[in-house]
Image (spheres, rainbow, N blue to C red):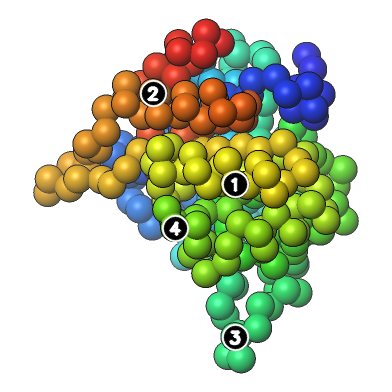
Amino acid sequence: MRSISELVKNNDLLILDGSMGVRAIMEGIDQNRIQAANIEHPDVIEKIQRSYLEAGTMALLTNTFNLTEETEQSSGFTMEEIIKAAFNNARTAAEGFPDTFILFDMSPSGYSFSNDDGAFPYKKCYELYSRQVRIAKEFRPDCVFIETIGMSDEIRAAINAVRDNSDLPIMTSMAFDASGKSWCGEDLKKYAGVVNELKPLAAGLNCFITPREMLPLVKEFRELSTQPVLAKPNRGQPVHHGEITTYKMSPEDYADELYEIYLDGVRILGGCCGTDEKCLARFTEKVGA
Ligand SMILES: [Zn+2]
């Protein structure tokens, strides 16, 4: 099996998975216990991950999004226990799919605005990410996927933490609204500055907006970035009917819009919030993967 680095450097197609958090909630998981669900409901996490591989995706992200000090404390489990269970679940889901890449998911540290003076607490953030990487590397992920970040300083802390504690390849992804502002108010240029300096294997955008909304931002980011670009957009706004959440955008429409980003030349693609195996299956079909 080729390494993920070889695949990306060759500009070959890498189809990532779809949403985990929203899917888990739809399967009845408490939204405050999605990390704990690795241990409490491994069958649910495995079922969701397996559905993506059956749809033709080539990689799974571990269910370790939002693994902060706060969620560790409220879960009643240690970070070690959660990360170990998350890798077990992904490996179990990938049984029968031997070419699956397992990506360790790292997300906002929870420290973005935690200092009274407004300064970014780099050291705290770096230490949290370092701790996560030291645990995760024992489970030999193919790559570390740093996602839904709002601040380029946090990207810097995460990349440095991964490099100081492992030799794992890194992909980074920041979340921007349709106007091109991250949830911490940064723009693509600032993000590209960090990416071009630290050169992760790939870098791009995820969450918040639909593929169609993301396309112009992706085009702009490709101009700015020296690194291969990735995109993992959302499926538009959710519609709530009491307990039930649905999405107006059909899997076909989602796949058609994601395909436009593919046609633009992006080769690392997947789905974020609200996407499901049907969205990814339809996209896989379109690209003939
Ligand atoms: Zn998302």
Q: Earlier in the sequence, mark 3 or mark 4?
A: 3
Q: Earlier in the sequence, mark 3 or mark 1?
A: 3
- Nearer the camera: disc 3 or disc 1: 1
Q: Is residue 267 above or below residue 2?
A: below
Q: Separation of disc 2 and disc 3 at Cα?
A: 41 Å
Image point 81% across, 48% down: which residue? 199
Image point 67% across, 63% down: which residue? 190
Three-letter code, disc 1: Glu
- Nearer the camera: disc 3 or disc 4: 4
Q: Earlier in the sequence, mark 1 or mark 4?
A: 4
CB within 8 Å, label 2 to label 1: no
Three-letter code, disc 4: Ser
- Name the element at disc 4: loop
| Quarter occupied by residue 123 | bottom right
Q: Position of residue 218 (x, y in %)?
A: 56, 42
Q: Nearer the viewer, residue 159 or 208?
A: 208
Q: Separation of disc 3 and disc 1 at Cα?
A: 29 Å
CB within 8 Å, label 4 to label 2: no
Crowdedness of circle 4 by 10 Å Cα count: few (<14), some, many (20+)?
A: few
CB within 8 Å, label 3 to label 1: no
Q: Which mark is residue 179?
A: 4
Q: Specify the quadrant that holds the N terminus.
A: top right
Q: Earlier in the sequence, mark 4 or mark 2?
A: 4
Image point 61% across, 27% down: which residue? 265
Crowdedness of circle 1 by 10 Å Cα count: few (<14), some, many (20+)?
A: few
- Nearer the camera: disc 2 or disc 1: 1
Is ligand 1 within 8 Å of the beta carbon of the residue shown at mark 4? no
Q: Which mark is residue 118?
A: 3
Q: Which residue is mark 1?
A: 220
- Name the element at disc 1: helix
